[in-house]
Image (cartoon, grey):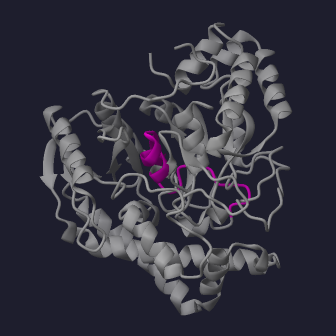
Amino acid sequence: MQADATALSKAISSGQLTSLEAMQASLSAAQKHESLGAIAYMDRDKGLKAAEAVDALASEQRLAMSFAGVPTLGKDLGGPFAGFPMAAGSRLMPRRGGLVDSDLAERFRTAGFCFFGLSTSPEFGLSLASEPAIGPVARNPLAPALSAGGSSGGAAAAVAAGIVAIAHATDAGGSIRVPAACCGLVGLKPSRGVMPAGPHFGNHLAGIATELAVCRSVRDTVAVFSALAGTTRGPFPPVALQPKHETPLRIGVLSDTGLDLPTSPERRLVVDDAAKYLEAAGHTLVPVSFTAIEAIAAQSRQCFVDIVCINLADTITRFDLDSSKTERLTQAVIEKGLSLSARDVWHSLNSMLMVSRDLWRLFDGIDCLISPILSSAPLPVGSFPSDHSDTELHFHRMAAFAPLAALANVSGFPAISLPFGSDRAGLPLPVQLMAPMGADHLLLQLAEQLEQDGRWQHRFPVAGLAT
């Protein structure tokens, strides 16, 4: 039996345990694993009341829910989730909001999820580590001296440790996929426009950001995607999701990330290994040279930086916030955003269109691209410090760790990361799959095939789920 949210939901629906017992187990696990820093804010009473409300439902109502009674966490960035005020990892925002649900949060609850807290995020999501100065520092359950990734690192740490079986996450530059890759989880960044972002979405970082979850299995990812996706009512046109493909697929294979942002040999080899596994399943492999993607990957990274900087600068000025309360790096990001001219911003927005167009051309010859998601093993805690003002160095460190992550965000294409084995230290060896807009089901189909090989096994059980 897979130890995941689907299994936990089935156990609750079948009467093997109650939602309240599952919640009590999660709360106990949260206390046991407190040193991991996965949870930034917790409300035990709200969690228990939510679980009791699910238990009070008629059995047929619970059976109609995808995740009836499953305990979970929102992220301290995104949402929002009513009753759980966010700080976005910042001293600037002392637990503000939490008054109403976002459209996405409402769908989480309708699916049966029971929230009891918010997971740790770096300040305003500006890092691929989740170590805000206000604390806590999110650590990797597989090796606590290492980072859990960012910006959904707290969510990934909680899921990998089994505190919860699944957790809300967001992705503007790899923030779902990178923590999933660090902690041996599955992380899907959906196509642009597939996930609801209202009612207060604004332009949602010009479209580079989206939300979903970090999961312990592909089947959980399929189920949560099905429960939350579609009918977004803006700000982008609805996306026509393609059905699963029954015929063999053309798999583009890109294991090299260039001389400037190299990927370690072990993590290049796992891409080739996963590709060969898919070839043995009947798919056709198509070698893709890094030169075919190098320019648009670099362009996407620059677009990401510009959009993040101008968005944060606009937020601070629009709400007349005191930026001196933020971390030193955040202040530098704000200053960089304020220094961008209207022409600079327009150039970046126009570049987004070019990235998407050029990536579509690459996919004229392939159906999916398999590549690395991380260039190395998870980095030590402290590898992304925020006590300096060198934004160029910071964003270079991010690019060096996840060279191709921003490409999916800027293009709007879906991408998924999942582990395909482990290294000599027992850490996950992840790969990334990317496909054209609307091909989310294709990615999930291929991810299911890779997962069937069983090369990665979770180290920690799910709280409340019998082993």
* x then y, percent, for residue 12: 65, 14
Question: Along the line of sight, which residue is nearer the eye, 426 or 401?
Answer: 426
Q: Residue furthest front?
A: 145
Question: In the visual, does 112 lie left or right of 205?
Answer: right
Question: Along the line of sight, which residue is nearer the eye, 71 or 447?
Answer: 71
User: Toward which corner of the image does residue 244 lie, by quadrant?
Assistant: top left
Residue drawn at (76%, 78%), measured in percent from left and top?
A: 323
* x then y, percent, for residue 196: 62, 50
Which quadrant: the N terminus?
Answer: top left
Q: Residue furthest top?
A: 15
* x then y, percent, for residue 362: 24, 63
Q: 286 above or below 226?
A: below
Question: In the visual, does 176 lie left or right of 21?
Answer: left
- Residue 148 visible here: yes
Question: Along the line of sight, which residue is nearer the eye, 333 or 345?
Answer: 333
Residue 184 on the magenta span: yes
Residue 345 on the magenta span: no
User: Toward which corner of the image does residue 425 lie, by quadrant?
Assistant: top left
Number of marks drawn: 0
Q: 440 above or below 56?
A: below
Question: Along the line of sight, which residue is nearer the eye, 356 or 44?
Answer: 44
- Residue 442 visible here: no
Residue drawn at (62%, 74%), measured in percent from left and top?
A: 387
* x then y, percent, for residue 417: 39, 46
Q: 218 above or below 409?
A: above
Residue drawn at (82%, 38%), measured in percent from left and top?
A: 43
Report the magenta residues as a range: 178-201
